[in-house]
Amino acid sequence: MAQSLELLLIQFLMPDNDARRQAEEQIKRLAKDPQVIPALVHHLRTAKTPNVRQLAAVLLRKKITGHWAKLPPQLRQLVKSSLIESITVEHSPPVRRASANVVSIVAQYAVPAGEWPDLLPFLFQCSQSAQEDHREVALILFSSLTETIGNTFRAHFADLQSLLLKCLQDETSTRVRVAALKAVGSFLEFTHDGPEVVKFRDFIPSILNVSRQCLANGEEDVATIAFEIFDELIESPAPLLGESVRSIVQFSLEVCSSQNLESNTRHQAIQIISWLAKYKANSLKRHKLVLPILQVMCPLLTEASQEDEADDLAADRAAAEVIDMMAMKLPKLVLPPVFEFASINCQSANPKHREASVTALGVISEGCFELMKDKLGPILHIVLGALKDQEQMVRGAASFALGQFAEHLQPEITLHYESVLPCILNALEDASDEVKEKSYYALAAFCENMGKEILPFLDPLMGRLITTLQNSPRNLQETCMSAIGSVATAAEQAFVPYAERVLELMKSFMVLTNDEDLCSRARATELVGIVAMTVGRTRMESILPPFIEAAISGFALEFSELREYTHGFFSSVAEIMDDSFAKYLPLVVPLAFASCNLDDGSAVDIAESDDEENANGFGGVSSDDDAHDEPKVRNISIRTGVLDEKAAATQAISLFALHTKSSYAPYLEESLRILVKHSNYFHEDVRLQAITGLKHILTATQAVFQGHNEGAVKAREILDTVMDIYIKTMTGDDDKEVVAQACMDVADIIKECGYLAIEIYMPKLIEATLVLLREESTCQHTESDSDDDDANHDEVLMDAVSDLLPAFAKSMGPHFGPVFAKLFDPLMKFARASRPPQDRTMVVACLAEVAQEMGAPIASYVDAVMPLVLKEMASPEETNRRNAAFCVGELCKNGGEPTLQYPLKQTVVYYGEILRGLYPMFGESEPDAVRDNAAGAVARMIIVQPNSIPFNQVLPVFVKVLPLKEDLEESIAVYSCICSLILSSNPHILSLVPELVNLFAQVVVSEAETPEVKGLVGRSFSHLISLYGHQMQPILSNLSPVHANALAAFVPNS
């Protein structure tokens, strides 16, 4: 065989394709015989040309796996000794490397079986040889062996690390240093043990030296191995970088700033900065590296992309991602330099610089949202100016930035509608479709949070949007539909005149069937649902059937996004139709079930075959034993479209249950099964909908089983299932939003069902709440490294957790006292001075509601919480002042009267301090809501301890801010107080009769106030008439006829 094989190997290397093909067929046939192994070994040792020897080694690597077990011991020994000989004697580097690859495969079988005890000693000997070739090939082998017999190295780990560090510092050979760099990368990838990984920190200076030398020699592909190593080090939870983070950042910044380097090399350098920002933000902050990074990243935004450069490798795009990540992690340090960069570059003569200035502001808006709200004036000045720029690229970036602001800087951005909306309207007329599309996106995001402010712009807006719908490319039509949806939501009933035209246009979109049009059909289906929600059941019910029919027919088109939006459309229709939606259930519920039960699917990319073999033309020699080679999985991706569809379908079945109640009975069992399954789904979007849906299923359950003989038992079983899932989710789910939703649902269930229904769950609920307050739940164990110790606190999560305490208090009343005693200290941890303002106001709001619901037992905590509340009354944050005023009122009301159980704790001793704290809140510069809450607090203080109030000073200030303008929940307290004072003929209140009559007139004509409040005011006015009779005439004559007539209705025999 040896002779014929030699001829075939030579023939395979010929340039003649036919000859090559014939040789390959013959080699394949011969390779099925185990005797091919010694024949290939013979040619590896003796063939005259390096190409033939290399090909023999390549084939040996491919065939050895299938034949090794069949070889007798002497042949196995021959293979091993020949490979060692090839590595040490062979002059050709490609042949040595090919032989080293065979060693890796053979070692996989021989070393664990104890058949190659001298391999490692040989490699250690080689790595210290005086010959450069030997040192290099030993390191190459160490690299490849980690993949096959890595565990064997564990006993030699310390020696290996010393060896690798020494070879990285090899003074005589660049090749050895490069091989050592590659070996470090291989070992680090294989090593997962914390203490072992930490030792690699000592390698960083040498790795940087080798990489710099490689870059200087033009070996960029080798230099980038350093970035792969740093990537591993950064992602490790072990504290690996230490002081070296400075060197890594400096090197990465040098590389990404060098425009003469390849795009891929620079991109990897930028990516390292991004990973550092994501995983080691505190290190960047501690070593004062944030500013140096931004001083490189911001100018990179001004760099023009090369024509042949892939978008994802462009330096400006990658730099934007870094700045975005840094803003998310270190907002306080990022905004000042980025704003300075934007302020300077927005005036540049270079359009790329002007574009960069607004791009930078756009990308940081999500992370720096709190800080940017305070600088919105000057920031908008830059962006709105750029929206009128003569260059399209600048206008496009400005419209992108406005869209980001509209999404992330709510609600403050909406206050600037008078300057922003006209600019967006102008941009919709832009000559560039790209600018138009981004402007429609900005318009959609901006209008989403608007209300009646949109009305003056409604007609021109809708005129422009309807025109675009009729005369634009599909992509513009789709963003236009999103914008119409936002406008409809903002305008509410004012949108009705436009609804018919919009719905008529949507009919043509909802029958599109070409693949390229299905996104537009999906958007149209969504928009019909939004319009239906806006105009209401009365106007929609009669015209719905053709839309429902079109929506159902879309399921035959096998397009996941269309199915997702259609489930959303059905959800909207169910919401407006309520129980009348029951007639559609047989049509739509099976569709939702089908989407819920879809296979998720996945896509797996397999790594390509050996690069060097392909490069040398040897990759065509296929192997009958390829099945034995384990492919490397590069990437696993889940079909996100299916996830979104599942989430929408999960939401749909829960809303069907909520709105059709008892009519949903036939689908209840299967829906519950799906929601229980999805509550443990791998993706948080689906879990969130399942957790929300379980509460809706409970609502339907109560309607379905009401009056049934076994209904109570069935309803209890379902409640048990739901509560068990909620309690597990609170402490065990890793997503904060899902946990927050579970907490909110539990609070609602407690309020709706009462204490008796949930009594058996209370111990576990209290324990889960304690775990969350102590920040010990799964979702609070964060891996990221951020701005400060409290930065990982999630406002939404903790607000939801703090809502549980008032819910417990509402269900238990004064009996909540002993439970609150356990929760009080963990709650108060969030009120420390080091905590952000939103934490402290969360505590104050929680205390207020607990006081309101628990009553007298709150007196025990007055001394402990009053210093916090008084301090919060002077907070610069409006929300904090509001909550403090509400809290102090509830503390006075519920903790102010001594009782047998709580004789000593009275808020009355704090009245002087409280009134001094409240006084500034009545100022004209304060927002209406703050003044309303301050008035509520004073009212409660007067009701509980009127003798402790200096009426002559307090009442004029109190009455002056009335009527209440925003927080009408304070109405009962405020007007009960005034009514009580008038009915008791308090002289100080009677001195304010003209002001009171004017106040009463405004209250009785208000559409927002309740009949109960108007009744209080009416009684008070009647009493004033009985006291003063005709003396009231001059005051009443000053009122408008509408006000006078409204008041007159409350006077007996008027």
Image (spheres, grey):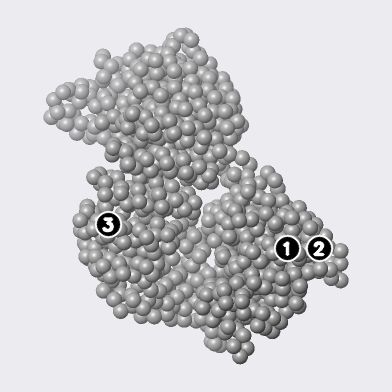
Point out the tag, 3 or 2, that comes first from the N-terminus.
3
Q: Secondary structure at mark 2?
A: helix
Kind of residue at badge 2: Val
Q: Position of residue 137 (x, y in %)?
A: 42, 18
In this picture, residue 1042 sits left or right of residue 749: left
Q: Position of residue 790 (x, y in %)?
A: 63, 44
Point out the tag, 1 or 2, that comes first from the N-terminus.
2
| In the depicted structure, whether residue 607 falls above or below residue 803 | above
Cα gap from disc 3 to disc 2, whole angstroms: 62 Å
Q: Which residue is mark 1?
A: 954
Residue 890 appears in view: no
In this picture, residue 1046 sits left or right of residue 41: right
Q: Which residue is mark 3?
A: 464
Q: Identify the image quadrant of residue 49.
A: top left
Q: Residue furthest bottom?
A: 1053
Marks 3 and 2 close (CB-CB < 8 Å): no
Cα gap from disc 1 to disc 2, whole angstroms: 16 Å
Of the pair 367 and 462, the residue shown nearer to us:
462
